[in-house]
Image: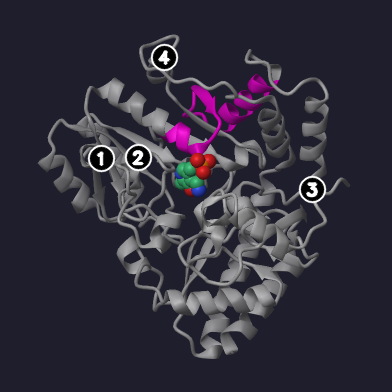
């Protein structure tokens, strides 16, 4: 295998610090929320990654959810190699786009037409533009703690990296732009009712992570998503499911099939690119017909529908048999049970937020239902825990407010190893 470098982490970190803000190309990689030195990861295989000093970690970050098959899965690697050998991208339609598009549509019937982008952020931005065009309205309603990419107007009370930086939003977003976003607590349907009453005929869309995975995992209350569906329909607003994380993770049909709630528009990313840069948005034909060149909503991308991302995504979806989700869910249940038991044995106040194979160990009493509760968790305790786990060779998300991503490469042995490490870490 060709190595990018054989230099050690210390040297690489120094060079990174001299190049990139915070030494990284995405903030959470800097480990600011847990302290200590950020990892420079050189390679991965299955459930494991190796840092540039050659140290191995059991990886529960899993490319922030993008590599559900594990790292360097042979089917994905082969597909990329085969495709790359025939040229990388042409700025024209390529057969691989239909291969992935048809696979997605077959699994998510609410997507009759779709458009590929190069990131989840772009897909969200484009879906909102479409929703505003379709409804002729300007406001977008989102939930505190949810993260929908770094779209200007959606950085208000967003989760993920913003949560740990304790920023209410981002500098550089004009108040006039932020004012187009209404932020409400998750799992509070009365708040949504009030917002519709207060902003009559102005709300273009409600955008929701059906399971919030960016404030740590917040599961939707029974009937909550169905209530959002009903209310948006009766108010003439669109319901947008941001399934960048939940798509092809909560099951073969994502959150929408798992919870039996059909959104107007769906945003995808991560898993559909098998680890390559990707995003997508899609929905009913009449909505997607508004997108250029069929309609007046402009959206484009030089490298959109990139053949390597398409090939990696199609190979990923092909490698997944629906029965694999059943096993993954059982293993996650075992992991969650092990975490709760470890907390009890150590006399620690911890709780597991979980929906299917997505979970977070919160350092607080009881699993949170919204971001306010999630943000009450003891970040300092999580930071100490994270460092102990890292020393034990387990890579967890470097923030209390991110999901753990067990995937198909995590077998029983890996799950038991994580539980054993947690037991030790919580005892100390
Ligand atoms: N939506 C959700 C739910 C996400 O978790 C993310 C990224 N973690 C995004 C959108 C943005 O995707 P990307 O980082 O590919 O722009």
Magenta segment includes 7: no
Q: Position of residue 56 (x, y in %)?
A: 77, 66
Callout 2–callout 4 Cβ contact below 8 Å:
no
Who is closer to the viewer here, 260 or 59? Answer: 59
Q: Secondary structure at mark 1?
A: loop
Image coordinates of residue 280 in percent, x first then y, are 52, 31
Q: CA distance from mark 3 to mark 4?
A: 44 Å
Give the number of the mark in front: 3 or 4: 3
| Lower sequence index among marks 3 and 1 | 3
Cβ(mark 4) to ligand 1 < 8 Å? no
Q: Is residue 398 above or below residue 348?
A: above
Reading the image, the residue beneath label 1 is 174
The residue at the far top in this view is 294
Q: Are marks 4 and 1 in contact (CB under 8 Å)?
A: no
Read off the residue under disc 3. Answer: 4
CB-based contact (under 8 Å), mark 2 and mark 1: yes
Query: In the rendered structure, which disc, 2 or 4, sits on the residue that comes first in sequence?
Result: 2
Say if mark 3 contacts mark 2, CB within 8 Å. no
Residue where numbered disc 4 is placed: 289
x and y percentages locating residue 257 in the rendered image: 49, 41
């Amino acid at each position: 295998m060709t190595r990018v470098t054989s230099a050690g982490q210390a040297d690489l970190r120094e060079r990174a610090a001299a190049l990139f803000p915070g030494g990284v190309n995405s903030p959470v990689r800097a480990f600011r929320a847990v302290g200590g030195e950020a990892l420079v990861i050189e390679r991965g295989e299955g459930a494991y990654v190796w840092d540039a000093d050659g140290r191995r970690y059991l990886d529960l970050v899993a490319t922030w959810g993008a590599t559900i098959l594990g790292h360097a899965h042979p089917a994905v690697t082969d597909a990329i190699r085969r495709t790359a050998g025939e040229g990388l991208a042409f700025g024209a339609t390529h057969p691989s786009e239909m291969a992935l598009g048809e696979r997605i549509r077959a699994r998510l019937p609410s997507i009759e037409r779709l458009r590929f982008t190069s990131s989840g952020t772009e897909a969200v931005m484009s879906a909102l533009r479409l929703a505003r065009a379709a409804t002729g309205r300007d406001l977008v309603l989102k939930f505190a703690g949810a993260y929908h990419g770094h779209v200007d107007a959606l950085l208000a009370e967003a989760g993920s990296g913003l949560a740990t930086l304790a920023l209410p939003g981002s500098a550089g977003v004009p108040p006039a732009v932020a004012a187009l976003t209404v932020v409400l607590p998750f799992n509070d349907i009365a708040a949504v009712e009030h917002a519709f009453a207060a902003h009559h005929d102005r709300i273009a869309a409600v955008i929701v992570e059906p399971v919030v995975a960016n404030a740590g995992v917040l599961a939707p209350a029974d009937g909550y998503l169905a209530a959002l569906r009903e209310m948006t329909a009766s108010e003439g607003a669109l319901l947008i499911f941001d399934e960048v994380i939940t798509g092809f993770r909560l099951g073969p049909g994502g959150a929408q099939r798992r919870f039996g709630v059909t959104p107007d528009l769906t945003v995808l990313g991560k898993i559909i690119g098998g680890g390559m840069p990707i995003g997508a948005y899609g929905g009913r034909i009449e909505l997607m017909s508004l997108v250029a060149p069929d309609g007046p909503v402009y959206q484009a991308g030089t490298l959109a529908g990139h053949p390597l991302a398409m090939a990696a995504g199609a190979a990923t979806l092909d490698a997944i048999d629906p029965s694999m989700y059943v096993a993954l869910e059982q293993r996650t249940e075992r992991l969650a049970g092990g975490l709760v038991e470890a907390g009890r044995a150590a006399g620690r106040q911890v709780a597991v937020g979980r929906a299917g194979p997505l979970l977070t160990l919160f350092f607080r009493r009881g699993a949170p239902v919204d971001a306010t509760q999630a943000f009450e968790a003891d970040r300092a305790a999580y930071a100490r825990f994270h460092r102990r786990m890292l020393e034990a060779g387990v890579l967890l998300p470097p923030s209390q407010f991110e999901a753990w991503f067990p995937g198909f490469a995590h077998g029983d042995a890996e799950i038991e190893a994580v539980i054993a490490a947690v037991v030790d870490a919580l005892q100390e």
